[in-house]
Image (tube, rainbow, N blue to C red):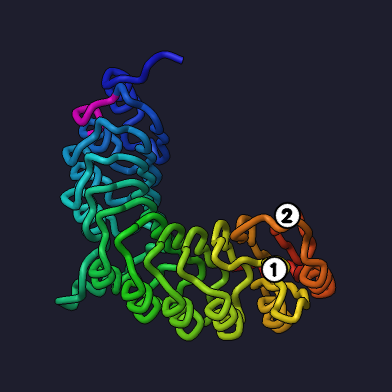
Amino acid sequence: IPLITDDTIHLISAHIGERLEVLYMKDCRGVSDDGIVQLVRSCNRLKVLDISHMHQLTDKSGVAIGQNLTELETFHGRDNYKVTNNSVDVIFQNCKKLVQATFWGFIKLTHVGPGTVTTPTDLSPNNLVLLNLWGCIGLTDDCVERLSTLTNLRSLCVSECHKLTDKFVLDITQILPQLLHLQMRYLKRITDESLNAISVRLSELFSLDVSFCTKLTVVGLNELLMGCRSLSELRLYSCSQLNVEGGQVTDGGGNSRRTGGGRQLVQVLRHSSLAFLDLRRCQQHQPFSRDEQFLNTMKELGYNEAMAYLFIKETDPALLVK
């Protein structure tokens, strides 16, 4: 495939122009800021744009996208690490029809969102449903304030935003109680306090990913499952502190017994709607033998072990509409 360059963009702009509505440019590293500026000025009716892995682009491109693509509904960016808030702020300000926005790996971002409501004009409908901020390592707990106007947001990803703490989760669950999907992988500062806030405030939550969150406990997960009855998918990959199957321990009297967080979890699972449970690598040490009591109870509850520690339960398809 020939290298796509600014000359290619010139041809697209000249011969297609306003008729173009969808454009995927992933990995097009031969295109410069000047090419993007020309593109968005000529093809200003674009509804879908993907500029992922175009590491060369700067705010010159980002600002031009926000200023010209007012019809934009879906924006995908990944690892465009030179782009800053100068671009993203303009995109949020002008692209009022945006439904999905991905700023994966935009490491220079310190905040995201249209800002707080200060005048009646700020109350214009915000259509954003999905916001992916995976790897935006510059975000802190204070970024919540600017997300408060995203009243239609249903899916939020803040995985690998390492500075976020329980305060972020407490605040986001209060201002965005309508969330259905929440991804918080690698947030190693959050604790059971976050799980409690989710269980109390996100009454419609369908899926939660807290894989690699190493401060969560079985007690916190039990509270989550008891409080969040709508939860159908729970991902806990590599939460080794849960020690699901545990191991054999011997007391002072020489009596041997099994310890493990799994036996505590199954008691709550009896009363939950959970259909997908990822417990892979949730062991401190690989046991010499599996915990048959835990596994048999999971089978009794209708869970099939698709692979070791990955449990799936058949459910009514009508429950999956979210």
Q: Is residue 178 left or right of residue 294?
A: left
What residue sits 37% from the left and 81% below the top? Answer: 174
Residue named by callout 1: 275
For marks 1 and 2, the one nearer the N-term is 1
Marks 1,2: beta carbons within 8 A: no
Q: Is residue 314 left or right of residue 112?
A: right
The 10 Å Cα crowd at callout 1, few under 14, some 14 to 19, many 20 or more, is many
Q: Is residue 35 magenta?
A: yes
User: Disc 2 marks which amino acid?
Assistant: Ala
Residue named by callout 2: 308
What residue sits 84% from the left and 74% below the top? Answer: 300
Secondary structure at badge 1 equals: loop
Magenta residues (range): 31-36
In percent of width and height, residue 299 lies at: 83, 69
Residue 22's disc number: none
Which of the 4 image quadrants contains residue 269?
bottom right
Secondary structure at badge 2 equals: loop
Which of the 4 image quadrants contains residue 115?
bottom left
Most foreground residue, 266 or 255: 255
- Quadrant where the C terminus sits is bottom right
The 10 Å Cα crowd at callout 2, few under 14, some 14 to 19, many 20 or more, is few
Q: Is residue 64 magenta?
A: no
Vertically, is 231 above or below 106? below
- Whole-Å distance between the Cαs marked 1 and 2? 16 Å
